[in-house]
Image (spheres, helix red, strand yellow):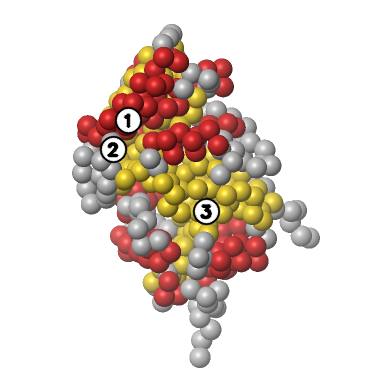
Amino acid sequence: MSDPMSDLVIRRVDPSDDADMDGFQHVYAAAELAEDPAVGLYSREDAHAMLTSSDPSALFEGFGAFLDGRMVAESILMGSNRDNLHLVRILLWVDPEHQKRGHGARLLAHTERRARALGRKVLLAQARAGRGLAGNRRFAERHGYRLTMTEIERRLILPVDRAELDRLADEAAPHHTGYEIRSSVGRVPTELRASYVALRNLLEVEMPHGELEVEPAGGTVDDLEATEREREEASRRTLAAFAVRDGVVVAYADASVPGDGFTHIDQYGTLVHPDHRGHRLGMAVKCAQLRLVADHFPDKEYVTTSNAEVNAHMVAINVALGFEIHQVWDEFEKRLGPIAS
């Protein structure tokens, strides 16, 4: 009898192969739904757009583990090709029908070897925590990952309470009278693109990372263009709000709205420039963004966001807006040592 472990074939996922992409989406969706039946999934189109992205600054590689030609596990390497070249994030899923057979461990080892070949020194990963999910942490720690931080996923059930939104925006308004609050659906307005990118580049260093050392991102307007094309290819629409002072974006909140068939909205980044804090701009841009949700996407059912547990200020804003805890995530880190001789 053949050994299923020896029969496992691991290789790159081919985004031009329909069978690969179907398997890639199936394994991901099945594993996610097994842990959280109410998860807001990414689509097959999202995966294809990322695997074929024209953004030279973005690292995104997908791998599949196959038994008899069927994908039973998958992994993704995500990072930047321009900055923080010591870091990479690993995502890993195993089809629930094929778990506890060693496939995840083998695929993880393969993915780590690829990370090492790319010169990455620090591997980042996350996994759901909570009742019935203790095995996630055990798996991570067994393979050399240490818990560094906890993130909380929160959801705002829609439709938003417009009266409460107006009250919160009105309370914040006197604190930023010298700022213009603007919003957009679709691509970032031309005149705001450069300063928006410059501010977004600070997100990596401004968000909590525990003891991890990071540098500002090196994104460009051309990178933003590539990201916007990628989202459009995946039938997504971007919605964003900006606080502007003297023509420069000093705060923003942006989100991505999946196409038909998906009921959620993915909140991405929210950031206020350090030099402009204390004016309640975080609340202002979040309120402006949620007005866009109410006006343009009345069919969506919730907005999802996540924050580090220690990010008290942003957590307070989200709680005030009505976001409620949905899931707890453990954040892990593994530092690669030198290659053994």
Which mark sits nearer the N-terminus, 3 or 1? 1
Q: Residues within 10 Å of mark 1 (few under 14, many from 20)?
A: many
Quickly name the residue at label 2: 160
Q: Position of residue 288 (x, y in %)?
A: 33, 26
Quickly name the residue at label 3: 329
- Position of 7 relative to 277 (above/below): below
| Front-lying residue, 340 or 208 | 208
Q: CA distance from mark 3 to mark 1?
A: 28 Å
Which mark sits nearer the N-terminus, 2 or 3? 2
Q: Which amino acid type corresponds to the residue marked 1 in the rendered image?
A: Leu
- Would you identify the image quadrant in which residue 254 lies? top left
Q: Which amino acid type corresponds to the residue marked 2 in the rendered image?
A: Val
Q: Secondary structure at mark 2?
A: loop
Depth check, mark 3 against mark 1: the one in front is 1
Are the two marked residues, 2 and 1, in contact with CB atoms closer than 8 angstroms? Answer: yes
**85 left or right of 286?**
right
Quickly name the residue at label 1: 165
Can residue 253 be seen? yes
Which mark sits nearer the N-terminus, 2 or 1? 2
Depth check, mark 2 against mark 3: the one in front is 2
Q: Position of residue 229 (x, y in %)?
A: 33, 35
Q: Position of residue 258 (x, y in %)?
A: 29, 44
Instruction: Say which residue appears at 27% left-offset and 47% top-offset.
Output: 301
Q: Residues within 10 Å of mark 2 (few under 14, many from 20)?
A: some
Instruction: Say which residue appears at 58% left-offset and 31% top-offset.
Output: 206
Q: CA distance from mark 2 to mark 3?
A: 25 Å
Instruction: Say which residue appears at 59% left-offset and 41% top-offset.
Output: 310
Residue lying farthest to the bottom in this orientation:
1
